[in-house]
Amino acid sequence: MTALQNKIDFAIIFRVKNANPNGDPLNGNRPRTGYDGLGEITDVCLKRKLRDRLQEAKQKIFVQSDERSDDGHKSLANRAKDALGAQLGGPETVKLACEKWFDVRAFGQLFAIKASGKKAKKGEAASESEGDTGISIGIRGPVTIQSAFSVERVDITSTQITKSVSGEGDGSKRGSDTMGMKHRVDLGIYVTYGSISPQLAERTGFSAEDAAILKSLLPKIFENDASSARPDGSMEVIKVIWWEHKSKSGNYSSAKVHKSLIVNPDGTYSLSDIGVKPDEVDGF
């Protein structure tokens, strides 16, 4: 593995058409929007999609969704115990976890480990760990990705739907569960930004080869992610912009690099010349 030598910034420009890219459970699962009316897709949602694409590319992933579990484990605790065994909680935890799982060495992870001791019964001497709630081992990852926001305010269409079969009673009467709502963003251009820190990459072992894998998958972030809320073709990556600096600390701050990209409401964009040559990758 080749150590990551240069700081990297990246951006993803994508189009949402007649889809619910990230529903808000606190708002009836309507597409997320801010007070200014701009559409939003959380960083957690985007990292979930990246993890799925990485798993499809045969990379080992720690935070797996239940329907994509490839080791039979339905909880992170069981996955960690099975993979790390006696090393879980020991000094080798961070090293072994980073070596085994791509998403751990990329995005970081918090391992919360319960205390092994038990509370003493009445009349017995207390154990050394009585009252101990365990330990937390935090791993700070080098790859950060921001929430995506639309370039302009988005229009949201809500449609009432009915199911042909009731899930309640004997089916002779239409139950309350036969009625529902679907929401969609009619059309929106979204942008998200991210960075990769070589300094933090040294701590987790995130390599130049790992960065190349991530770069190759960013244009495919919405592949194999179709659902009734996001039909095939409704989420389209237009362009991935990849800036590789000439040093570990970077030629400029990430804020200045990201601001050099101006995205228009129709999906076209322009780049200011800041001395860091961008690699412009088309969506797939």
Image: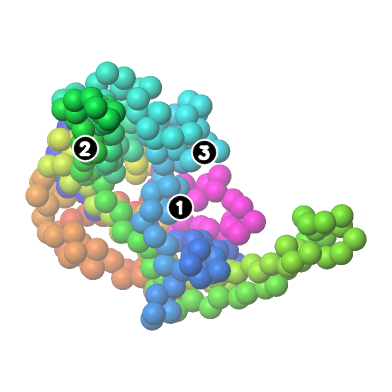
Q: CA distance from mark 2 to mark 3?
A: 33 Å
Residue 154 appears left or right of 173:
left
Report x, y in % for residue 256: 17, 65
What is the three-letter code of the residue carrying label 1?
Gly
**Separation of marks 3 and 1 at Cα, in angstroms:** 28 Å
| Majority secondary structure in the magenta region | loop
Of mark 2 and mark 3, the one earlier in the sequence is 3
Q: Secondary structure at mark 1?
A: loop
Which residue is disc 3 drawn over?
A: 66
Q: Residue at x 19, y 64 (%)?
A: 255
Q: Secondary structure at mark 3?
A: helix
The answer to whether marks 2 and 3 mark residues whose Cβ atoms lie closer than 8 Å is no
In the rendered structure, which amino acid carries the disc numbered 2? Gly
Task: Name the side, left or right, on which 160 lies relative to 54.
Answer: right
Query: Which residue is identified by label 1?
Result: 283
Q: Position of residue 160 (x, y in %)?
A: 70, 72
> Residue 213, percent across and down?
35, 37
Disc 1 and disc 2: Cα gap in Å?
Answer: 53 Å
Q: Nearer the viewer, residue 277 or 267?
A: 267
Q: Which residue is mark 2?
A: 131
Q: Amino acid at mark 3?
A: Asp
Q: Which residues are magenta?
A: 217-238
Q: Is residue 74 above or below residue 15?
A: above
Name the one closer to the observer, 6 or 130. 130
Residue pictured at 38% horizontal, 49% vertical? 47
The answer to whether the residues at label 1 and label 2 have Cβ atoms under 8 Å apart is no
How far from the left and from the top, in percent, is residue 226? 59, 51
Magenta includes 235?
Answer: yes
